[in-house]
Image (cartoon, rainbow, N blue to C red):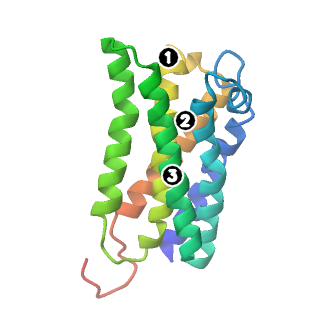
Amino acid sequence: MQHRNIHLMLAVPGMSGVAALFLSFTSDISPMDAAFDDRFWKLALPFFLSIPILAASIRWSFSGSMSLPERAAAYTVALATAAITLSFLWSATDGTEEDWLYTSIPVAILVLGAILLFGNSRPDATRGLRPVMALQMAYLANALFCLAVFGGDDLFDMQVGAYCVVIAVIAYFLQIVLVLTPSRSRPGRNQ
């Protein structure tokens, strides 16, 4: 029960990801604006994962589980979004060292996400949160790439939407850590 309460509390700062959709991220352009741009829609679309992440986090916090169709939808959306991010990277990379450095960020996050999702097979109370974690990893891959490329030269050079994304990234990262941390809420249970 304690894990669920913490996840519910982390959903509050995670809501900043939803707010970021409508706030300027860079050059006075929000992810909502970029979603209708022919060049940048592939980078804007993953920011919309904040909506199903919020809904799924709240759903799991109250019920403790997700139905099979909900889990299947979460995994499908996460996989499709990761593919969209990778397709943008594939088409935008021109082979410079800087491009490869920036491209390695989302690729490493997606690979790590796959390892964590498939390597985390313990049957514990947070197992039902893996679909949320899949969505979060797809969000993190794109968000950290966009923050590195478009976020500004330093922390104080970002626009308000980018700050909201940073807050969401931190909340999602903490939820992922919590999912991977063994639950000690049941006395006498060996982990």
Q: Earlier in the sequence, mark 3 or mark 2?
A: 3
Q: Quadrant of the C terminus?
A: bottom left
User: Is residue 61 in view from this perspective?
Assistant: yes
Q: Picture coordinates of residue 49 (x, y %)?
A: 60, 47
| Residue at the disc numbered 1 | 154
Spatial separation of the CA atoms under disc 1 and disc 2: 13 Å
Q: Residue at x 65, y 44 (%)?
A: 48
Amino acid type at mark 3: Ala
Element carrying mark 2? helix
Residue 121 as seen in the image, left or right of residue 50: left
Question: Can you say whether 146 is above or below 137 in the image?
Answer: above
Q: Earlier in the sequence, mark 1 or mark 2?
A: 1
Spatial separation of the CA atoms under disc 3 and disc 2: 20 Å
User: Is residue 66 in view from this perspective?
Assistant: no
| Residue at the disc numbered 2 | 166
Q: Earlier in the sequence, mark 3 or mark 1?
A: 3
Element carrying mark 1? loop
Q: Residues within 10 Å of mark 3 (few under 14, many from 20)?
A: many
Taking the view exactly as shown, the residue that stands out farthest to the left is 190
Q: Residue at x 45, y 48 (%)?
A: 137
| Residue at the disc numbered 3 | 78
Amino acid type at mark 2: Val
What mark, if any, has residue 121 been given in the picture? none
Spatial separation of the CA atoms under disc 3 and disc 1: 30 Å
Dot 3 and dot 2 residues touching (CB under 8 Å) = no
Q: Picture coordinates of residue 122 (x, y %)?
A: 30, 73
Residue 96 as seen in the image, left or right of residue 30: left
Q: Residue at x 62, y 48 (%)?
A: 50
Element carrying mark 3? helix
